[in-house]
Image (cartoon, grey):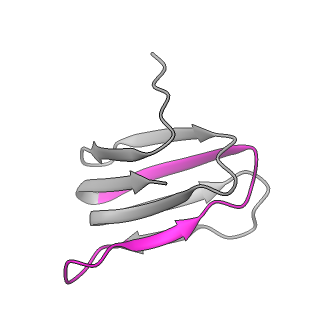
Amino acid sequence: MRIEMKSGAVTLGPNQTLRLVDGAGSTVCAVEGSVWITEENQARDIVLQAGSGTPSCYRLRSRGVAIVNSLGGTAAVSFA
């Protein structure tokens, strides 16, 4: 299955993974819950945690593959 979107939001179930391809410059925000992000050719991973009604955001840096995984339960992520 393939889902294409330029912006919007997705809810991930517990430990569910989303694979992003060539997302450099896109912003990923944790709207609810926590997510772990790892990017191809980047030395460090990122953990985003939404809190107090304020999303936590990260701008993707690599043109390759990025993996977004929900941590510890359901998470809602938005993309712009």
Q: Answer with left or right where residue 59 lies relative to residue 41.
A: left
Q: Residue at x 68, y 70 (%)?
A: 44
- Tell me which segment is drawn in magenta: 49-71
76, above or below 10, in the image: below
Left or right of residue 4: residue 8: left
Q: Quadrant of the N terminus?
A: top left
User: Where does residue 22 sit, x and y in percent of width and height?
Assistant: 70, 41
Report if residue 29 lies within the magenta region. no
Going by the picture, which residue comes out furthest to the bottom?
Answer: 52
Question: Is residue 21 shown above or below 60?
Answer: above
Q: Position of residue 19 (x, y in %)?
A: 53, 38
Q: Residue at x 25, y 80 (%)?
A: 51
In percent of width and height, residue 23 lies at 64, 47
Q: Quadrant of residue 78?
A: bottom left
Which residue sits at x=28%, y=79%? 54
Residue 13 appears at what percent x and percent y?
A: 24, 44
The residue lying toward the viewer, choosing from 76 and 80, is 80
Name which quarter of the figure residue 46 lies in: bottom right
Relative to 54, is 65 on the left or the right?
right
